[in-house]
Image: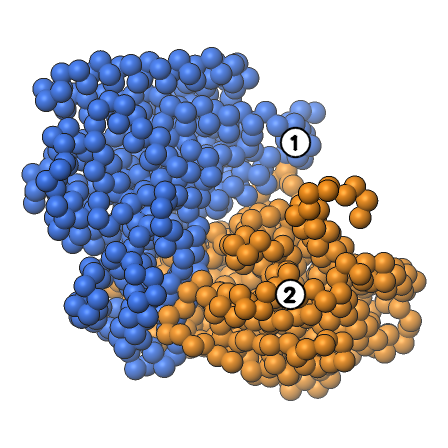
Amino acid sequence: MSIEAGVVLEERRDQVHRVGEGDFELACNRASLAGAVSQRACVFCGSRVVLYPVADALHLVHGPIGCAVYTWDIRGSLSSGPELHRNSFSTDLREKDVIFGGETKLADALDELIERHKPKAAFVYSTCIVGIIGDDMEAVCRKAEERHGIPVIPVMSEGFKGSKREGYLAACKALSRLVGTGDTSDISPVSINILGDFNLAGEIWILRKYYERMGVQVVANVTGDGRVADLRRAHGAALNVVQCSGATLALANMMQKEYGVPFVRASYVGIEDMAEALYVVAEHFKDKDPGIVERTSAVVRDELEAIMPELARLRKDLEGKSAAIYVGGAFKAFSLIKAFRHLGMKVSVVGSQTGTSEDYKELARVTDPGTIIVDDATPLELAAFVKEKNVDVFVGGIKERPIAYKLGVGFCDHNHERKLALEGFVGMLNFAREIHSSAMSPVWRFTPRRAEQRS
Amino acid sequence: MSANYVATTNACKMCTPMGASLAFLGIEGGVPYHHGSQGCSTYMRRYIISHYREPVDIASSSLGEKHAVYGGGPNFKKGLLNVMRKYEPKVIGIASTCLTETIGDDLHMLTAEFKEEFGDLDLPELVYVSTPSYAGSHMEGFHGAVRAVCGQIASDDGPHGGVNLLGGFVSCEDIRWYNRILADFGIKGVVLPDYSMTLDGPSLTDYQRIPVGGTPLAGIKSMGNAAVTIELGRAIPEKLSGALALQDRFDVPAVRLGLPIGLRETDRFIEELERVSGREAPDHERDARGRLVDAYVDGHKYLYGKRAVVYGEEDLVIGVCAFLAEIGVQPVLAASGQSTGKLEAAIREVTDGLVREDVQTASNVDFYEIAELAESLKPDLLVGHSKGYRYAKEWDVPLIRVGFPIHDRFGGQRINHVGYHGAQALFDRIVNAVIEYKQSHNSVGYGYI
């Protein structure tokens, strides 16, 4: 029996592909199959991911307690100032609220929390049952906004209404209500917003420094170390630099349409992509600022010089090893594949929760024959693939970690909970150290599966 | 007292299906199954994995928008079939969620329909519990699931004659002690739930679809023939008591005690085992008890008069307060996000005669309220799960980590709370935390303490 027949449910067969075996076609963008144990979360999760790092806003989850509890301070999004976002606020709906409606409780909770914390804006997230019981969040928020004089923005993130992607869109719609409401008079013509970076382990601070060294003003972080006032004037930036799997792409599109702000896409993971993210911005501004290209080259050169010697040492140990990648959005996987090449490693399993067919086509193009590509994988599938390909390291999130460890495979957390900066040039070095410290640990030789292989 | 505020800030509880899932994870061949949106199971898996560091598969009926409108029945059944295909479970533990309860899906009816429709298949045991997140906390979910097992799949098939032990929401290490102590007494025991292996298993050559371990299904089937059911937890509501369900269904007498945390609560449990078995406690347990009392004496001066804030599930809080009172630490606040109505009386009972001031209790509170109360109480120690860390840091007082979740330390699944060994381990940690605090806040740097 093939591995696919053993672990992949019939209805999911077309969501798994081996590169080089037949024409490439991978089904994706489907609702998760009931009973399959998807690694995906929900619409609410997508919205929470995007908006969470806005540090001086109140984030109120309107619903029963679970959704707020499981998202309390779970991400490594750092703030250089206020840390209101690191709290978990909920209307904690109870039975009687479900029966009689939660609007009054929501209004009262907003009054209480806004009075107490004096936030610069409030985001109110709807959860599964809010749509069902019919609370008019829009009206409650509008009235609260009038009472308190700050933006109170409903985020339509009922969990069951799609996947994370719909949540991104709901978050972008919420953000678009802030953009365009602030003063832009002192913004430089050589200026950008950083979209789609969440300042995990301080990553956006690293990026901002690169851009500042190039002579570029960063207007708003969207949303890592984010501030309401910056978001309100983000439309004054000359360019949007958008990272990632589309978490904030919808906002970039809206801003282009509404305010004529163009955007470029970028990734800050790995050496080439990081350098490219700087060069593409330099290219955009070179007419306005002729010296920018040279300054950018200097930044890249200095940063590379600082990391290359150690990277080369680490590579010596890692050469020839192999990796599996399972991430939320496929975009990160492209950068990771390149980053692994720098370490002399090959990627033999790659998948994502919410990749698009273009993403998967591109993955098939950049990976070696035999590589397994999978959409919306289950734990059983991932375990089987990791075992079959006998990888040395798995890159994923906390939910994938025990799969790797049970099979005696190293692991690198590349998800929102990480505590180590993995973006930027220094991030590439950190990544290499992470991979090295897991792959080279002596503990694997004691794990039964690896011990069996050695004997 | 109850909540003074409308909004909940930094809750000191989790949601109902979380507790049900944890209980179902402790049944042999069991797969928890949420009837609801995909996000619930993924969020809870992540939360559980961060504590236990083990694979945790929780299936979901993954309802989408049209199911919420037209009913989740078809997806519910499809999901069960897929779980059967890929996991080959012996038991599927079904928990509802706020979504499915609100749209009016009835688990009893849906499960019956499923059994009817697919009666020709070799079906696993299906046990279900209603767990809308808007009613109760994770502990109501936990006990609800245990009661559902006792009420729906327990029977009087097969020999037993021993003890059904419903041990409460304790650590994997604690459950291992339950199993050991029953074996030491020569008592046949059915410990429910038993996630001591399923959530703390060994490294393996192959990935297990369902981790080995768990309360054996054959044991559950024989629960009706036990001599007694011992249920641990003074704050378990009667309507969620598995022991009372077994008493009603099979006339198995129910003995309801507190979690065996500290000397006296452990004594009560051991005495019950002595009574049931007709044997005396084994020598090594008596020795452990002796060493514990000896340690209480050796360490008492470091602790006397220290003030502790204790928070978490009501039963854990009650047990910890019983223990702290024994060692001369004054619990100044016993707080919980739960609200069974049993906390205050239970705390009074377990601390009676040992504390110099009444212990203030607070149910249905969040960390905002706990912090507000605690600030004027000037605690020397916090005792609870890792979500209190930020307050311990802010106030610069040691946090003694107990219970679930422990997301900021290693080995939460192996913390021993129960029995004499558990009390000994807690005692050593508390004394050392006090000593370490003293050492690090003193310029001399004493090398002998």
Q: Using the rendered image of the protein, determine whether residue B9 is visible from the camera's viewpoint.
A: yes
Instruction: Describe residue B177's horizontal placement relative to residue B123 as left or right.
Output: right
- Distance between the Cα atoms at labels 2 and 1? 39 Å
How many numbered markers are drawn?
2
Colour in which the image shows chain B: orange
Q: Is residue A253 above or below residue A56?
A: above
Q: Looking at the picture, tell me which residue is in the foreground, A324 or B159.
A: A324
Q: Which chain contains the residue that carries disc 2?
A: B
* Residue B166 quadrant: bottom right
Q: Which chain contains the residue that carries disc 1?
A: A
Colour in which the image shows chain A: blue
The residue under label 2 is which amino acid type?
Ala
Q: Residue at 30% of width from left, 82% of height from top?
A: A100
Q: Residue at 30% of width from left, 25% of height from top?
A: A210
What residue did someone put label 1 on? A443
Counting from the top left corner in percent of width and height, residue B239 is at 56, 83
What residue did someone put label 2 on? B308
Q: Which of the numbered marks, if any, corresponds to residue B15?
A: none
Q: Residue at 45% of width from left, 62% of height from top?
A: B10
Q: Residue at 91% of width from left, 71% of height from top?
A: B280
Q: Is residue B183 above or below residue A211?
A: below
Pair 2/1: label in front: 2
